[in-house]
Amino acid sequence: MAREYPLERYRNFGIMAHIDAGKTTTTERILYYTGKSHKIGEVHDGAATMDWMVQEQERGITITSAATTTFWERTEDGSTALSPKYRFNIIDTPGHVDFTIEVERSLAVLDGAVCVLDANAGVEPQTETVWRQADRYKVPRIVFVNKMDKIGADFFNCVRMIKDRTGATPAPIQLPIGSENQLEGHIDLITMKEWVWAGEDLGATWEVREIRDSLRPLAEEWRGKLIEIAVEMDDAAMEGYLEGKEPDMDTLRKLIRKGVLTLSFMPVLCGSAFKNKGVQPMLNAVVDFLPSPLDVPPYMGFAPGDETETRNIERSADDAQPFSGLAFKIMNDPYMGTLTFTRIYSGTLSKGDSFLNSTKGKRERVGRMVMMHANKQDEITEAFAGDIVALAGLKETTTGDTVCDPNKPVVLETMTFPDPVIEIAVEPKSKADQEKMSVGLQRLAAEDPSFRVETNFESGQTIMKGMGELHLDILIDRLRREFKVEANIGQPQVAYREKIGRAAEIDFTHKKQSGGTGQFARIKLTFEPLEAGSGFQFVSAIVGGAVPKEYIPGVQ
Ligand code: GDP
């Protein structure tokens, strides 16, 4: 069977954001406009949705890292299809600091990202954390300034904050038309047209028209800035520009694409997911500017057991290449059992195939394979490079494992998981609870490498260790709901970790009691050895969680 979509028409991307910036709403709208979800707000129904766990809905956070496949036809005016369909695999990246590890593993398998900002709050501390992680994985990004309809929305302030807080170069390719409850749409600085959403039809229709006279000078000014940044990408374009020639529309798009792929700058777009304004052009920007799997550098690979022998995996549309992939998320499906979400980097995988888990040195066989859509799961028989599939029936494979052709074994660059920083004791109420608890804990630990279970030898108590209070809360909640365990829960305790290796890390959690509720700050300091071997030099500090006021200078 041949692949349906050429690899250059794949976009594997994530939506990253600070909690509450509107990631869930934006994702819902994307799934709505790409036609895979029946009605706005229905994305939460059914098993194959982005936010499928009860806790997430109650707490309003996203902790799972599923992937959803959907399709988009790039449109310019809402009616004419200008290009063939693109295949989107949207990889969910959680936004809460306690689950940055989940963010890391999704970042390892995506090729690009849309960073959603709250137009009022701009670049928030958590955005900075996620941003740094994306920098580390060299993830090309576009920025969507969401909530332009909200009181206090300030697009230009967000643009400034991107520059000041992250050091990246923001390149607005749109300007808002109006803001707060006067938000109409935006000016597209590439086509120099207005996009206006007028109807109450959930954003289904919009009008593309000439820029109104009152906004023309501002649009000209910002188009000038955009061109100035873009022509840096190409000598010929720069020469032309210096001679007074502006790049045409196609050239400008190509220059921006180059800027994104080389992480030289980040296009900034705007709108309101909630008010259905600006989502479709953002999807066009995903097509225009985010990489296909062919645009990213080869994936680093090694011979199993020998890190000195590199076996990098070239990005290639040649399906005859040996199969390789990375398992990045384990989930339990009520009907299919354990599902192992796997990104395929090269070759093909067919139902019934047996392959090597080169991380563990074990053979595995694919029972069933499914492709997750917003409102359904498609059972498939063959998957290709670029695809993200959920494999059922695997016995040995866990998050971070490489899967590959047994005749061409390779181990992909492994993901590292930090040690847990908070622990809590749990005591089942009865013997029956004890049994249910061990099954539950085993299952949860298999799904989540940042969660550990230990027994305290002195007290005989079971100790759950995780990345933060909320992380443990959610796991305890799941023990109660999914495994019907009744248990007494102790007070969270702080775990302290110090690791002096080639680079030294001190990772500790500060706990402050305030009115009965614990507040945690997680602080990670990194040091590098000095050349002379005489000591260590401070490199960076990462602070996460709820930081007590006295930690922040100038705050009373
Ligand atoms: P997440 O935590 O990033 O997934 O954020 P959600 O999508 O759950 O949104 C958080 C809150 O902001 C919800 O109450 C949304 O209804 C609201 N919200 C999301 N997008 C917009 C927007 O464009 N405008 C306004 N005014 N509110 C929004």
Image (tube, rainbow, N blue to C red):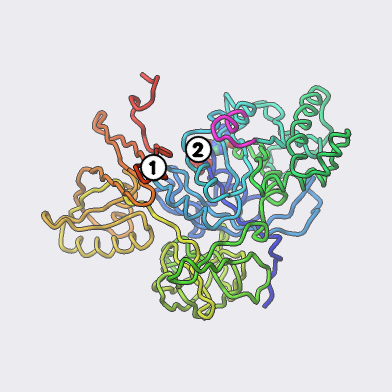
Indicate the secondary structure of the residue bearing disc 1: strand
**Left or right placement of residue 376 versus residue 233 in this view:** left
Measuring from the top left, give residue 129's x and y in whole percent: 47, 40
Q: Most prominent secondary structure in the magenta stretch?
A: helix
**Left or right placement of residue 406 versus residue 244 in this view:** left
Residue 128 image label: 2
Q: Which residue does the image show at 82% across and 30% down from the upper left?
A: 211
In the image, is residue 309 part of the stretch drawn in magenta? no
Measuring from the top left, give residue 421's x and y in whole percent: 30, 46
Choose between 100 and 514: the one closer to the eye: 100
Q: Which residue does the image show at 50% across and 79% down from the upper left?
A: 406
Residue for badge 1? 527
Magenta span of residues: 160-169
Badge 2, how many Cα within 10 Å: few under 14, some, many 20+? some
Res 231 quadrant in image: top right
Q: Which residue does the image show at 26% across and 53% down from the upper left?
A: 464
In the image, is residue 164 part of the stretch drawn in magenta? yes
Residue 141 image label: none
